[in-house]
Image (cartoon, rainbow, N blue to C red):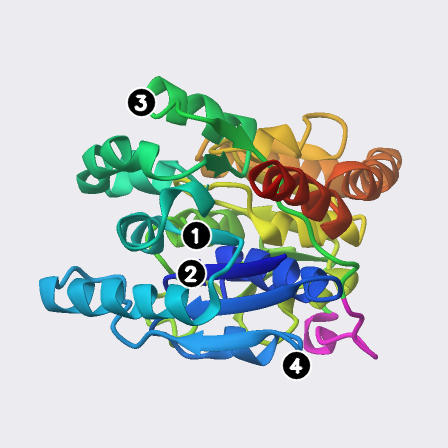
Amino acid sequence: MRILQVITLCDLGGAQSVVVNLANRLVKEHEVIVAAGAGDGKMWLLLHPSVICERIPSLRRALSLLNEIKTIRAMRKLYKKYHPDIIHLHSSKAGLLGRIAFPSAKIVYTVHGFDSIRIAHRKYLFLEKMLQFRCRTIIGVSKYDEDNLCNEGINNNVCFVYNGISQPLRLPESPFNKMRSYSKIILCIARLSPPKNIDLFLKVSELLPQYAFVWIGNQHEFRGQYSENVFFMGSLPNAGAYNEYADLFILPSNYEGLPMTIIEAMAFGKPVVASKVGGISEIVLDDENGYTVENSAKAFCEKICYILENKDVYTRFSKNALKSYQKKLTVDNMIDGYLRIYNGIVD
């Protein structure tokens, strides 16, 4: 098969990680082209050399009629150039323009967290409903997404495929040596963007001064006030590898799809405490490998302390987290799910 993957931005985020994992695995047996728009370009650096890369400079998150026209033209040129068997669109903007530009019979569209449209960008919701018939399959990244798509009237060939990752890389030594004075290290990997609840993270850290709280993923310096047990480490390559030297992973968030960062933590056998949003509760199971909680500092603190202060609980959660990853969140699981969909279109 010749497979064209299209995503809005070439930054490094959860959706881009899915594209990278898909492309790098599929290129072993298929021809893969990845097209993306604006951004810092970090995604390109992670793609296998055999993956063909196509840049669409006019494809941006912000709305601009001129750029949208340029992007549709660029997409149509790509189609004429490669004549792909499958066109896989990722994220709302690429999904919108791609369904206008490309032949609908070949399109697969993954919504990387429907709440980002349903809650934060409802202006796209009407267009999503109108364009649902301009593709063969719409895919959520969780059952939660599938259900909410259907509840909003987007129910034409909708299914879900869980995100998956390869076994993460390992670091040669601990990056947290300067935090040895703290009894435990609690890690959060996320961009400083509206979906992430940085204020809640800081409130929790203030209430638990005995623990070090590490935030990886801030592309810009955080300028607010925070307690001395908080460490902002910036945007780092292979950030998921830092889980190996942390004790617990947390993710305070206002809305999510199925966070890759949680899957990375589970691949290292780390218990997770996260906000009860999106599809998180489908993989973080209460009293099994962690907890999902309401967005309150008290709720986060209670579960963090319960896990870290009870050795037997921590050991059980750690083993179960790794088992959860191995059972349904590996890149092989994800590839199998998407290939079933691709083959159904090609056949």
Residue beneath label 2, please?
Answer: 7
**Circle 1/circle 3 CB separation < 8 Å:** no
Instruction: Report which quarter residue 31 is drawn in.
Output: bottom right
Which of the pair 295/32 is nearer the observer? 32
**Which of the two discs, 3 and 4, labels the residue nearer the N terminus?**
4
Lateral position of residue 209 relative to residue 184, left or right: left
- Closer to the camera: disc 3 or disc 4? 4
Residue beneath label 1, please?
Answer: 89
**Cα distance between the residues tagged 1 and 3:** 20 Å
- SS class of the residue under badge 1? strand
Q: Which residues are magenta?
A: 169-180
**Which of the two discs, 2 and 3, labels the residue nearer the N terminus?**
2
Q: For the residue marked with disc 4, what is the amino acid?
A: Pro
**Cα distance between the residues tagged 3 and 4:** 40 Å
Residue beneath label 4, please?
Answer: 49
Residue beneath label 3, please?
Answer: 152
Quarter containing the N terminus: bottom right
**Circle 2/circle 1 CB separation < 8 Å:** yes
Percent of width and height locating residue 3: 56, 59
Lateral position of residue 6 relative to residue 305, left or right: left
How packed is label 1: few (under 14 Cα within 10 Å), some, or many (20 or more)?
A: many
- SS class of the residue under badge 2? strand
- SS class of the residue under badge 4? loop
**Cα distance between the residues tagged 4 and 2:** 18 Å
**Cα distance between the residues tagged 2 and 1:** 6 Å
Image height check: is 187 above or below 11? above
Q: For the residue marked with disc 3, what is the amino acid?
A: Glu
Residue at 39% over, 41% down: 254
Residue at 24% over, 67% down: 73
How packed is label 3: few (under 14 Cα within 10 Å), some, or many (20 or more)?
A: few
